Image (spheres, rainbow, N blue to C red):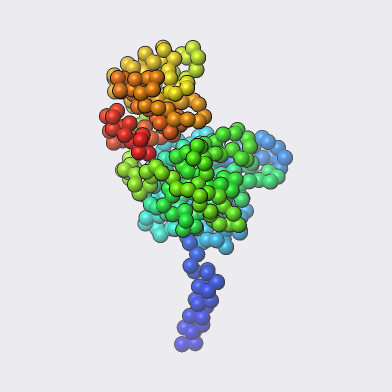
Amino acid sequence: MKNLRGILVLLALLVSVNIVAKPKIRIIATGGTIAGVSQSSTSSSYSAGQVGIQTLIDAVPQMLYLADVSGEQLVNIGSQDMNNEVWLKLAKRINQLLNEEGYDGVVVTHGTDTMEETAYFLNLTVKSDKPVILAGSMRPSTAISADGPANLYNAVAAAVSPAVRGLGVLCCMNNQLLDAKTVIKTHTIDCDTFEGGPSGIIGYIYNGEAHILQTPNNAHTLKSEFDITNVEKLPNVGIVYGYANASPLPMQAFVDAKFDGIVLAGVGDGNFYKDVFDVAVKAQQKGIQIVRSSRCPTGPTCLNSEVDDAKYHFVASLELNPQKARVLLMLALTKTHDWNQIQELFKKY
Ligand code: ASP
């Protein structure tokens, strides 16, 4: 009896100091510069994806005040080596953690090079409105003023925030929260490299709290119709870069390799060099879906502008840059090969 009273008092104490009630946050580590190691604290040369998840967690004990944090290592790679197989594994694991294992939110540590693509893929394939936050760093873990620990702390702060629920997948970098659809890496080496595109950032983290400024307006997560539960392999989609006097060879190589779709990182409003255009028209006639996007860093690729999409059955990527257009085209091709329906998906997502 005495023992029971002791246990109840202890439980009450734990609840009152908010120990048992803390949100359960899982960190899935995938590598990147946040897990990078350099020869010295001042060197700019380093290898990404070296230290493991426990080292990352141990470096930021402050986040244990915010949440019941645990972690797992999915892969340990520089995100230049990110691929479709890891994306499928990651999305399936997040769905499990949030829908079957009772986690309140997930933080993914990730390299910055392809973070925007992974974020957008997850935005379309995670089936939960709980927070999913990607965090990385531009300086390796061994650097003077490494930015990883603060980014990780902020990501956990975002993941425990009720205000972040329902916003879709976000990136948390440099105190800012950025929408998966619009976020872009804009600088090769600066810490302040991520931007939120024309609509700006979704919010920011200040004093360990998320402050939300706006809500993403595209469909995502629970409203997404893409279901990768039983998908083992994504369609093959490549990107062809546009430039003056462009060679048609890369586009032709994708056609010869029987890719399912090709995204053009076109000049201006998604325009082709004429030799590339000829190959694209034939590819589309063979059933390889062409999506026009742009190498311009800002502005949409508009439907039926200088190119007659209705005539050639091309799809315009609208607000999506080429690398995100590739993500959506792969998912779209798991559902349909009808160019009109694919264009509708580009309007929606
Ligand atoms: N190449 C690294 C990566 O993407 C760069 C970084 O994380 O900042 O993994």
**Res. 121 image quadrant:** top left
Residue 248's x, y, as percent? 43, 14
Picture layout, residue 349 above or below residue 244? below
**Rendering coords of residue 81 (x, y %):** 50, 34
- Report the front residue among 276 and 142: 276
Residue 307, above or below 133? above
Q: Residue at x 50, y 52 (%)?
A: 212
Left or right of 224 on screen, residue 120: right
Q: Position of residue 348 (x, y in %)?
A: 35, 38
Query: How many numbered discs, if any?
Result: 0
Q: Position of residue 238 (x, y in %)?
A: 41, 26
Indicate whether 63 appears above or below 145: below
Q: Residue at x 52, y 68 (%)?
A: 19
The answer to whether residue 261 is visible is no
Query: Residue 228: in sight, yes or no?
Result: yes
Q: Depth check: 31 or 172 in front?
A: 172
| The image quarter in which residue 285 lies | top left
Quadrant of the image for the C terminus?
top left
